[in-house]
Image (tube, rainbow, N blue to C red):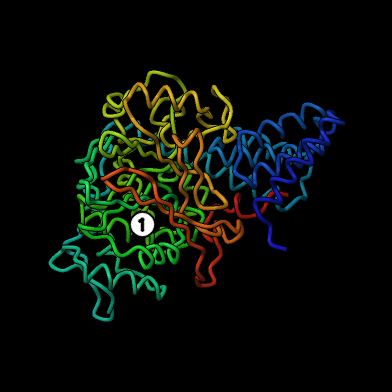
């Protein structure tokens, strides 16, 4: 039977009921922790694993779960400590030993990266590339940029080439990356656009490396053009195993229609996530580590939010951990960095709405959850009508909450080949800015599983 979101939601419900009757059962906490891991509620998963260990400090699975939760949150040192405990108690457990070694490798790599980074002269990868003199071999018959420029013909050829699971020549990939870095770095952190009465824009949510579903969006809704503008709201990469194809296609359209094709950063356009959920592994497998470094530089220049007609604000995650944040504060964010652990930049990428008023700690273990009252106050202070965000899988592909003032759109149908959800995109027209939802279902893709390139720690299920 296909494991779906619902099974995990039900599991969470049953374990919660069981814990009400028997609050000192470490196994129930540990099992609920696993269900939370599966639904990406890493903050809750961490809390449950910790609780299981408070009840029974010899419960080995608890250490495993806590390590997995910390890994998912990019807290590698904390994870390493728990893997150490498991290996000490079970020296013959191959899986545990492998995870311990893998995690230890990451901790060392991170320390090494920090040591180099403090070398103030942080050079761009671009400086060490000689793209001009990269030769395209005679036996390469795929698409090439025309005089170094992206054209519509090139885009159509590249999309077909990718559809056949072929690889774009590295020279072309580098050309796209260098040019798009230049375009993005000139944009403000908050992009503001005006839609005329007669114009409409299409807003898409997470695409997560599901290339064949991206092609389907263009088939259903038309290719991007000056008269058919798009906004893709972050999380282009990771999980799905065609992330390179997705991101190069999106970057290509950004170069072709810089004023009519918009991209915002998601929480997965970051090093920590890419290391865990597949994008770094995919770029290294299809190209090189150096190219991943360049992607990382480019991602740091993606804008964080977009405002349409001074009325609708769009961001990947959501609103803020404290009241009083203004659009002007967003304009001032210095975004060219890995996101911090707290503050407005972190919130824009990570927060989620909740049905009850006020704020609570995030189920994800990062940022916060914000209620309808928070949304109401923010919109009022900034004279906005509503917000559009993504970041959460929804069964129908979209969800309208907070009395119509907070809209979620998610564009990766049958997410990770197992959630069974629809995808959706939104049309907004300049005349009334009333959201119009369009749903679609997943299309077949070549037999490459999601997470094929993910860190082995994330692939191996979670004991």
Read off the residue under disc 1.
247
Residue 376 visible within the image: yes
Q: Position of residue 328 (x, y in %)?
A: 27, 24
Residue at image point 22% right, 51% down:
198
Q: Quadrant of residue 83?
A: top right
> Is the residue 192 above or below the residue 93 in the image?
above
Q: Is 124 positioned to the left or the right of 424 in the image?
A: left
Q: Secondary structure at mark 1?
A: helix
How many numbered circles does the render carry? Answer: 1
Residue 280 visible within the image: no
Residue at image point 32% right, 43% down:
433
Residue in front for this viewpoint, 295 or 386 = 386
Residue in front for this viewpoint, 435 or 415 = 435
Q: Is 134 positioned to the left or the right of 206 in the image?
A: left
Residue at image point 82% right, 33% down:
19
Q: Residue farthest to the right?
A: 22
Residue at image point 53% right, 54% down:
454
Packing grade of label 1 (10 A; few <14, some 14-19, many >=20) is: many
Q: Residue farthest to the front?
A: 432
Q: Position of residue 351 (x, y in %)?
A: 49, 33
Q: Quadrant of residue 360?
A: top right
> Is the residue 28 above or below the residue 253 in the image?
above
Residue in front for this viewpoint, 112 or 336 = 336
Q: Position of residue 389 (x, y in %)?
A: 43, 41
> Is the residue 98 above or below the residue 28 in the image?
below
> Is the residue 278 above or below the residue 326 in the image?
below
Q: Position of residue 185 (x, y in %)?
A: 22, 41
Q: Is 262 positioned to the left or the right of 341 in the image?
A: left
Q: Is 255 positioned to the left or the right of 396 in the image?
A: left
């Amino acid at each position: 039977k296909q494991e779906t979101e619902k099974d995990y939601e039900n599991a969470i419900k049953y374990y919660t009921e069981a814990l009400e009757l028997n609050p000192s059962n470490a196994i129930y906490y540990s099992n609920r922790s696993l269900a939370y891991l599966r639904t990406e509620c890493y903050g809750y998963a961490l809390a449950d694993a910790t609780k299981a260990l408070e009840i029974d400090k010899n419960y080995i699975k608890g250490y495993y779960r806590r390590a997995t939760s910390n890994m998912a949150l990019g807290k590698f040192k904390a994870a390493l400590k728990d893997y150490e405990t498991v290996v000490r108690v079970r020296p013959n457990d191959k899986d545990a030993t492998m995870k311990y070694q893998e995690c230890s490798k990451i901790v060392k790599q991170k320390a090494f990266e920090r040591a180099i980074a403090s070398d103030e002269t942080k050079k761009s990868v671009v400086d060490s590339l000689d793209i001009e003199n990269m030769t395209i071999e005679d036996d390469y018959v795929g698409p090439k940029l025309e005089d170094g420029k992206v054209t519509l013909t090139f885009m159509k050829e590249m999309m077909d080439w990718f559809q056949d699971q072929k690889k774009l020549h590295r020279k072309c990939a580098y050309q796209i990356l260098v040019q798009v870095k230049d375009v993005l770095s000139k944009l403000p952190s908050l992009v503001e656009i005006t839609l005329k009465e007669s114009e409409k824009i299409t807003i898409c949510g997470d695409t997560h490396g599901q290339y064949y579903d991206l092609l389907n969006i263009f088939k259903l809704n038309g290719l991007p053009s000056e008269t058919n503008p798009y906004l893709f709201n972050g999380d282009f990469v990771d999980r799905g195993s065609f992330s390179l194809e997705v991101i190069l296609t999106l970057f290509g359209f950004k170069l072709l229609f810089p004023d009519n094709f918009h991209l915002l950063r998601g929480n997965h356009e970051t090093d920590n996530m890419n290391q865990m959920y597949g994008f770094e592994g995919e770029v290294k497998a299809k190209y090189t580590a150096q190219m991943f470094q360049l992607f990382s530089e480019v991602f740091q220049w993606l804008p964080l939010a977009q405002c349409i007609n001074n009325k609708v604000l769009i961001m990947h995650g959501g609103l803020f951990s404290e009241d009083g944040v203004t659009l002007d504060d967003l304009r001032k964010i210095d975004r060219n960095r890995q996101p911090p652990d707290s503050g407005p930049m972190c919130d824009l990428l990570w927060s989620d709405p909740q049905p009850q008023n006020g704020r609570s700690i995030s189920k994800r273990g990062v940022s916060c959850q914000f209620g309808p009252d928070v949304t109401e106050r923010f919109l009022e202070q900034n004279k906005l009508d509503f917000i559009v965000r993504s970041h959460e899988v929804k069964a129908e592909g979209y969800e309208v909450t907070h009395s119509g003032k907070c809209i979620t759109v998610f564009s990766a149908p049958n997410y990770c080949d197992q959630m069974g959800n629809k995808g959706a995109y939104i049309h907004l027209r300049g005349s009334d800015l009333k959201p119009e939802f369009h749903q679609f279902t997943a299309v077949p893709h070549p037999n490459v599983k999601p997470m094929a390139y993910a860190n082995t720690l994330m692939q191996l299920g979670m004991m």
